[in-house]
Image (spheres, rainbow, N blue to C red):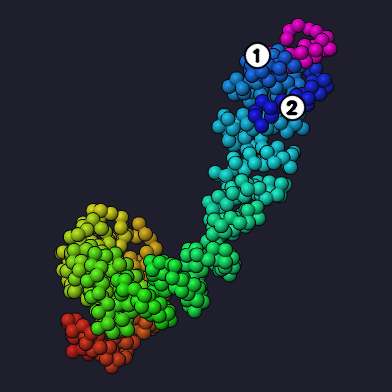
Amino acid sequence: MSFIVKYLSAILIIFSLLSCSSSKEVKTSEEVITKSEIILPDDQRKKIALDNFIDGNISFQQGNYALALKRFETALQYDTSAGLYYAFAKAALFNNKLIPALDAAKKSVELDSSQADFFDLLSDIYSLGKQKDSAIVVLEKAITLFPANQNFLYKLARLYQDDRPIKAIEMYERIINLIGPEWNVLFRLVELNNKLNNTEGVISAISRLLEIDPSNVQLKKSLIENLLIVRRNSEAIALLNELIELYPDDLELIQKKAQILLSENKWEDAYNTLNLIFNDKKINLDAKLELAYLFFEKSVSDSLVKPIVKQLFSRLDKDTSYWAVKIVLGALAFEENNDSLAIENFKYVTENANWNVDAWIRLGALYFDNKKYEEAEKILSQAIQSFPDNYAINFILGISLAQQSKNEEAEPYLKKAVELNSNDLNTLSAYAYTLNQLKKDEQAIYYLKQALAIDPNDVNIIGTLALIYNSQRLFEKSDSLYERALELKPDDPLINNNFAYSLSTRGIQLERALRMVNRSLEKDSLNSAYLDTKGWILYQLGRYVEAKEFISKAVELGTKSAVIIDHLGDVEFKLGNKQKAVQYWKEALELDPTKKEIEDKINKGGI
């Protein structure tokens, strides 16, 4: 309904208001509306007002808004009823005179708060004048007077939705309670609940949309995704079953169901679901392979899935000699230590698909991300032969070797990765760390400074540089970097631990060091390095019984470390257990024969 037609319906109301309006003077704030100085009888004044009102409405209907405004202005000189102020405000608005329109609209509401149209016009004028908060105030008052007015609720919801989405949701829900499920309103609820990350609210709104359009497949797919977010898997699978029955060739639906079943460790059910695809000769190999990869990726982190994976890919291998099948079979053979079969499969890949570097990278990265560093190394050692100048293969192979403490082997690959991509922070940092492990500190510092030039606020790089300066006993530089890192990330567990340990080895700021390592342990209570640091701080504070408790736990949890076992020997010595102390020192020296200070303690029989 147009603006004109909308407000013409109010004419009959205004006639009735005119006939019973008070002749009492009301001062107006508009300069254009002034009381007539001619004294006339009340009935004559009302007649003049009514004649001008009628003429004004006729002019308004004809689109002559300027003349209508003049007629209403004249009428107001003889009668100041709420209805006339409303008519004047409406005409002023159509003449782009917002200030007089606003003043008159306010008067109409002040004089008569029983008319919904008066509030409607006033809120519209505030909105047009970009006075959003004032429009909200008017509409909030209006819905207390007219709680069932859908128009007011909708306008208020629209004004709320940017800054007060929860209030907007409340308004939209009130509209639905009044009129029942309505598509546009429910769609707004989906948007607002998404904005608030309120998945349950999204699910509720989509479910009600489906009541309106129960055959909408996209809505059902969206509902499934949201059900999975809140782990309502059984409902998601029920919907998927319903859709799969209707669309048995929709691979996306079958894949989604298999993913859910895999996430619940229902391997056999997932396999049976995918059998629908693997048994269908009309479905192409790429689609089957994509689904089989779901199992393979899961098998990397869960060995229980491996038999099914082997079965799937062996089955595909009978139907095709596709290289993408061979590469997975090669990976599986490596995991089973069947090197000859692995090499046979990988050789096939290099001979028939030596152009496809992405497959090798994907496979290597998958193993690395799942902390299968040895497998990643084996895969990428094959790949590097065909792609010696590929950045990703050099980088992932290098860090896979570094994670196994094979730093000498890692160094040339990481160096190559830096040469191929000298602006990548992770590559520079990994190479610098490896150089540090190889005692090539000056080179490590050079590359770390390059990295900091790219990102001066990278806490990991700052911490690594601080660690190197600390090992060089350049404590002023080291401490300054640690302080900078803590400014950027006060709760970083590694920074807190490393700085705390540095302070403890110097016997300074021990109480602060203790607070820092406690922060680290709050993040990772079973980290052997953090436990050893706390134990060593307690040792420096003379709290030897407590120190033994933490360092012993570090030894139990961690890999054999010369430093930690040496610490345990020192604690035992302080507790008077000299024989045990010497035993631990000998064990530490066997792990790291370069530790001259440990050898001295053994020879002296004490600290």
Amino acid type of the residue tagged 1 in the rendering: Leu
Whether the magenta-drawn stretch holds residue 284 is answered as no
Secondary element at image label 2: loop
Q: Is residue 273 visible?
A: yes
Residue 402, by quadrant, is bottom left
**Foreground: 457 or 404?**
404
**Residue 10 tag number:** 2
Q: Which mark is residue 80?
A: none
Q: Which mark is residue 67?
A: 1
* 146 shown above or below 330: above
Q: Residue at x 26, y 72 (%)?
A: 349
Label 1 SS: helix
Residue at image point 82% right, 20% down: 19
Q: Is residue 421 above or below residue 306?
A: above
Q: Mark 2 is on which residue type?
A: Ala
Whole-percent x and y of residue 566? 27, 83
In this view, the residue farthest toward the bottom is: 579
Specify the segment rendered in magenta. Answer: 31-53
Residue positioned 59% across, 47% down in the render: 188
